[in-house]
Image (spheres, rainbow, N blue to C red):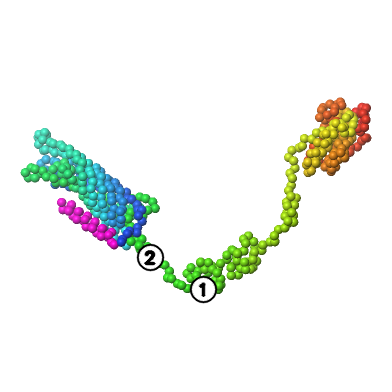
C-alpha cells in the first residue's frame, strides 16, 4: 500500500511540473512536428508480491512496446507482456504456485528532465509512467500434506481476466540517434474479485474469512529501444525544446554589423557591391556591376550604341557592324553559283536502246530503221549529260579483216545519220567496232540479227580507229572466207 501511494504521489507531481512547463504564456515548441516512433524490447524478471506465499524464484518476462511523443515532456506508450512466475512457502504443508501472465496496457509517460537540456540532445532520460491494462492469467497451485494419508493433498487452478493499474519509473541512456537503453521498475496492481488469487491463495483473517489482498506483480526489466523513421527528428523527449530558438539566436548573432559605406558612390553599399570601383556616373546593376545592356563587352557608359542589334560584331565604340543591304544582282549571283555547284548524278542503270539492222554486206541505214535512230536521238536530247557508244557488228561470213572494216562502216553510218538527220553533237557519240566477234545468234551463215549497230550509255569507253583493210560493204560478198574477201 505504501509503495502504491508513493507511486501515485510521484506521478501527479511530475504531471503538474510538466503542465507548468508547457503552459508558459504564448509558448509553442519549435522542434520539428514529424518525429520518430520508438520500438522497444523489454526483458526482465517479474515476481508476485503477496502476503500468503513467498516469491522464492525470479520469473521470466518478455515484452514489446511502441512509444510516441506528444511534446518534449509527454509521450504515450502501448505495451504487451508475457511472464511466467513461481511462488513457494515452507510450513507444515508445502504450498507452491506457478502463474502465467499475458497482458496489454497503455501508459502516459512523463520525462522529468526535459527542461534541463544544455545540449541539442540529452544523454539521460528520467521517466515516470502510469496507465491501465488488461491481463489474462492462469495460476496452478499445489498443497502437499506430510502425512501418511495421501488423500489430504489438494491441487487447484485459477484463471482470470482482470483489469490492472500499472505505474513505475525508469532511466534511459541515449547511445546514438537511433538507439537507447533503459532500466525500469513497474508495479502492476490487479483489480476486481480475482485480485488476491494471482498466487493461487487468498489472504485469510484470524476468524477464517478472506479479504481482498490484491497480489502485486513487480516487473524490473531492461529495455532496448530503437527509433524508427527516416528524415524525421528523434523522439521529442530526447530533443532540446529550446534548440530551434538557440539556433535562431545564434544565426542572428552571426549576422554582420550593418555598414553603409559606398566607396564608389554608385548607390550600392560595399557589403553587397561586387564592383566597388565603378566609374563615376556609370549605370550599375542591383549588385553594383557596371551595366552592359546589349552584352557586347562595351559598358553602357562607353557604348555609343548601348542597344546594338544582336549577332553582329561591334567596334571599339560598341557600334554594330551591320553589312549593306543585299541587291538583286547579289541574289542572282548567289543563285547562279548554287545552281552551278549542283552535280547531276550519273544514271544508275543502262538505258535500253534499240539495235539498228543492216542488209547483207551493206552499211547503208535502211528507211525501216529510221524510227530506232529517232528514239536514240530523243534519249540523247533529253539527257544532255550522257554519251552513247555505237558498236558495229557483222555475221560470220567473210574474212575477219573484211568483217572488221564492215562493222566499222556500219557504226560510222549510224553515227552520221544521228548527226545529220537528228542534230546530235558528234562529240556525244563514241564509235566502236566488233566485227563478227559478238554474235547474237551462233551461226556461220547469213543472219540478220548479227548484222547490226548497238547503242549503249558510255561508261568511260574511247573511240576506236578504222581497222586496216580494203573497203567493205558495197554490193554482195562472194568468195571464200579464208581468201580475205
Quarter-of-image position of residue 20: bottom left
Q: Decide if residue 407 is on the left or right side of residue 320.
A: right
Residue depicted at 84% across the width and 30% down the height: 450
Residue depicted at 30% across the width and 57% down the height: 72
Magenta span contains residue 7: yes
Percent from the top left, x then y, of residue 205? 8, 45
Residue beneath disc 2: 250
Quarter-of-image position of residue 300: bottom right
- Residue 58 or residue 281, whichever sits in front: 281
Residue depicted at 86% across the width and 38% down the height: 421
Q: CA distance from mark 1 to mark 2?
A: 33 Å
Residue depicted at 86% across the width and 36% down the height: 414
Q: Which corner quadrant holds the C terminus?
A: top right
Q: Are the residues at dot 1 and dot 2 in contact (C-beta closer than 8 Å)?
A: no
> Secondary structure under badge 1?
loop
Indicate whether 188 appears above or below 278: above
Tell me the crowding category of disc 2: few under 14, some 14 to 19, or many 20 or more residues within 10 angstroms, Cα based: few
- Residue 199 or residue 23, whichever sits in front: 23
What secondary structure prevails in the magenta region? helix
Magenta span contains residue 456: no
Percent from the top left, x then y, of residue 166? 22, 49
Residue beneath disc 1: 265
Q: Residue furthest front?
A: 328
Indicate whether 481 appears above or below 289: above
Whether residue 43 is visible, yes or no, is: no
Tell me the crowding category of disc 1: few under 14, some 14 to 19, or many 20 or more residues within 10 angstroms, Cα based: some
Residue range corresponding to the magenta coloring? 1-25
Percent from the top left, x then y, of residue 381? 80, 41
Q: Earlier in the sequence, mark 1 or mark 2?
A: 2
Percent from the top left, x then y, of residue 226? 33, 50
Indicate whether 454 appears above or below 218: above
Tell how many labels: 2
Amino acid at each position: 500500500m505504501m509503495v502504491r501511494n508513493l507511486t501515485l504521489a510521484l506521478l501527479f507531481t511530475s504531471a503538474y511540473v510538466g503542465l507548468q512547463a508547457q503552459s508558459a504564456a504564448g509558448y509553442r515548441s519549435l522542434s520539428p512536428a514529424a518525429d520518430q516512433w520508438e520500438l522497444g524490447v523489454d526483458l526482465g524478471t517479474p515476481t508476485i508480491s503477496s502476503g500468503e506465499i513467498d516469491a522464492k524464484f525470479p520469473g521470466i518476462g518478455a515484452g514489446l512496446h511502441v512509444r510516441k511523443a506528444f511534446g518534449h515532456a509527454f509521450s504515450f506508450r502501448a505495451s504487451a507482456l508475457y511472464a511466467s512466475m513461481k511462488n513457494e512457502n515452507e510450513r507444515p504443508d508445502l504450498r507452491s504456485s506457478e502463474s502465467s501472465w499475458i497482458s496489454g496496457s497503455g501508459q502516459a509517460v512523463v520525462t522529468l528532465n526535459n527542461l534541463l537540456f544544455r545540449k541539442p540532445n540529452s544523454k539521460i532520460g528520467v521517466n515516470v509512467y502510469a496507465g491501465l491494462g488488461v491481463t489474462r492469467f492462469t495460476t496452478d497451485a499445489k498443497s502437499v500434506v506430510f502425512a501418511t494419508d495421501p488423500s489430504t493433498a489438494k491441487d487447484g487452478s485459477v484463471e482470470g481476466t482482470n483489469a490492472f493499474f500499472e505505474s513505475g519509473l525508469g532511466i534511459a541512456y541515449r547511445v546514438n540517434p537511433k538507439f537507447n537503453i533503459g532500466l525500469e521498475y513497474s508495479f502492476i496492481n490487479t483489480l476486481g474479485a480475482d485480485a488476491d488469487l494471482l498466487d493461487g491463495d487468498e489472504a485469510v483473517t484470524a476468524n477464517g474469512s478472506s479479504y481482498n489482498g490484491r497480489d502485486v506483480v513487480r516487473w524490473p526489466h531492461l529495455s532496448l529501444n530503437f527509433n524508427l523513421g527516416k528524415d524525421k527528428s528523434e523522439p521529442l523527449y530526447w530533443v532540446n525544446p529550446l534548440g530551434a530558438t538557440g539556433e535562431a539566436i545564434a544565426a542572428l548573432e552571426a549576422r554582420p554589423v550593418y555598414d553603409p559605406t559606398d566607396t564608389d558612390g554608385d548607390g550600392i553599399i560595399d557589403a553587397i557591391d561586387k564592383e566597388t570601383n565603378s566609374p563615376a556616373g556609370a549605370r550599375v546593376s542591383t549588385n553594383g556591376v557596371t551595366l552592359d545592356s546589349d552584352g557586347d563587352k562595351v559598358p553602357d557608359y562607353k557604348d555609343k550604341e548601348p542597344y546594338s542589334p544582336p549577332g553582329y560584331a561591334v567596334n571599339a565604340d560598341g557600334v554594330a557592324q551591320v553589312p549593306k543591304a543585299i541587291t538583286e544582282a547579289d541574289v542572282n549571283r548567289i543563285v547562279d553559283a548554287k545552281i552551278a555547284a549542283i552535280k547531276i548524278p550519273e544514271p544508275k542503270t543502262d538505258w535500253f536502246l534499240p539495235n539498228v539492222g543492216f542488209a547483207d554486206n551493206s552499211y547503208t541505214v535502211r528507211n525501216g530503221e529510221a524510227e530506232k535512230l529517232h528514239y536514240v536521238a530523243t534519249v540523247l536530247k533529253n539527257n544532255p549529260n550522257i554519251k552513247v557508244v555505237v558498236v558495229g557488228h557483222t555475221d560470220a561470213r567473210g574474212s575477219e579483216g573484211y568483217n572488221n572494216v564492215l562493222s566499222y562502216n556500219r557504226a560510222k553510218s549510224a553515227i552520221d545519220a544521228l548527226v545529220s538527220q537528228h542534230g546530235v553533237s558528234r562529240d556525244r557519240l563514241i564509235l566502236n567496232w566488233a566485227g563478227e566477234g559478238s554474235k547474237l545468234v551462233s551461226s556461220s551463215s547469213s543472219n540478220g540479227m548479227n548484222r547490226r549497230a548497238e547503242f549503249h550509255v558510255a561508261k568511260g569507253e574511247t573511240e576506236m580507229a578504222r581497222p586496216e583493210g580494203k573497203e567493205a560493204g558495197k554490193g554482195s560478198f562472194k568468195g571464200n572466207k579464208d581468201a580475205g574477201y
